[in-house]
Image (tube, grey):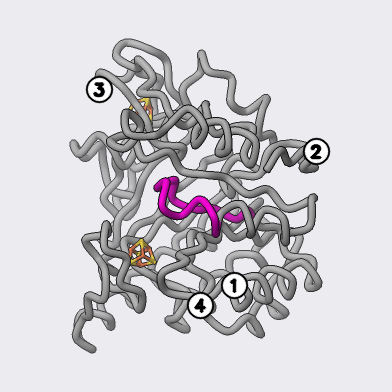
Amino acid sequence: MHLTILYRGSLISCNYGCEYCPFAKRQQTAAELAIDKQSLERFVNFISQHPQHQFSILFTPWGEALIHSWYQQALIKLTQLPNVNKAAIQTNLSCQLDWVEECNKDKLALWATFHSEWVSRDRFLQKCLNLDKKNVKFSVGVVGFPNFKTEIAALRQQLPNHIYLWINAVKSELPNLSPADQKLFQSIDPLYELNTNHYPSFGHSCRAGKSVISVDGDGTMRRCHFIKEPIGNIYDSDWEAVLVNQPCSNQTCHCHIGYVHLEYLKMNQVFGSGILERIPDNWVYQECLV
Ligand code: SF4
Ligand code: SF4
């Protein structure tokens, strides 16, 4: 079996303070962070103890994980395991990057988000170029608020064309976006429009729950991050038995980490093997109209 796992432990803290984010500048106690570390180590052990299955893993922390050594160590260990195809993580890229040299870089991928209020473009860009030099696969993302557009356009111009820059559509802001702003975002990210939709999902077939699951620090399994009802626990002996085809029970799905698994959208044809880290297949940036 090949199983994709979206792991989100008990980390809920971040070194940045983005005003739209509930985890902005939140801190956790040493005891709370120790629980997150233990849970993560248990999860990595679980993966290594199931060599009969292949795994792809995306860490989707609430907060910034890579500033903590245990997430770096987890990626080093996971990418070295023969039964792991991919280990990817969402990050603000504020961490040091020396640890990536200890990973199997063929299996490592980063989903890096640029927050122009908290880091200069030059500094972020240097991190990107460093990753590129180290042959690490990564996408770069930004949040699509119109007031960030100058920084977004400048970043696209400075990034090498083979690095994909995605723009997360802020659904609540869409009515306030001018046609010119929409055109600008679409010119920077040709897949921007895909991210502006609430896709009908109720009753539709979705890989989440069968070959993709969400797992928390206690091992609780859910179909995805958007359906809260647990379906089992990976630390139970019969954990595989709950993985079944079932139609989606939510009305819509609007987040990349969810809708890419909706069968009818065929997003695997768009993203191919880069679906977890959000890198389109054969990506090269062709055109910049700005
Ligand atoms: S970097 Fe990410 S987790 Fe941290 S405050 Fe900003 S949006 Fe939130
Ligand atoms: S369509 Fe979205 S909400 Fe429904 S099961 Fe799939 S990932 Fe979850």
- Say which quadrant the C terminus sits in: top right
In this picture, is 249 found above or below 285?
above
Q: Which callout, 3 or 4, points at the residue further toward the start of the chain?
A: 4
Q: Which callout, 1 or 4, points at the residue further toward the start of the chain?
A: 4
* Residue 131, quarter of the rendered image: bottom right
Would residue 274 appear left or right of 47 to someone viewing this image? Answer: right
Q: Say if the magenta span includes residue 143.
A: yes
Would residue 86 appear left or right of 287 to someone viewing this image? Answer: left
Magenta span covers which residues?
139-151
Three-letter amino acid code of the residue under disc 1: Phe
Residue denoted by label 2: 286
In this picture, is 144 found above or below 109?
above
* Residue 271, quarter of the rendered image: top right
Residue denoted by label 4: 94
Would residue 3 appear left or right of 81 to someone viewing this image? Answer: left
Name the element at disc 1. helix
- 279 and 234: which is toward the camera: 279
Residue denoted by label 1: 124
Q: Position of residue 15 (x, y in %)?
A: 35, 79
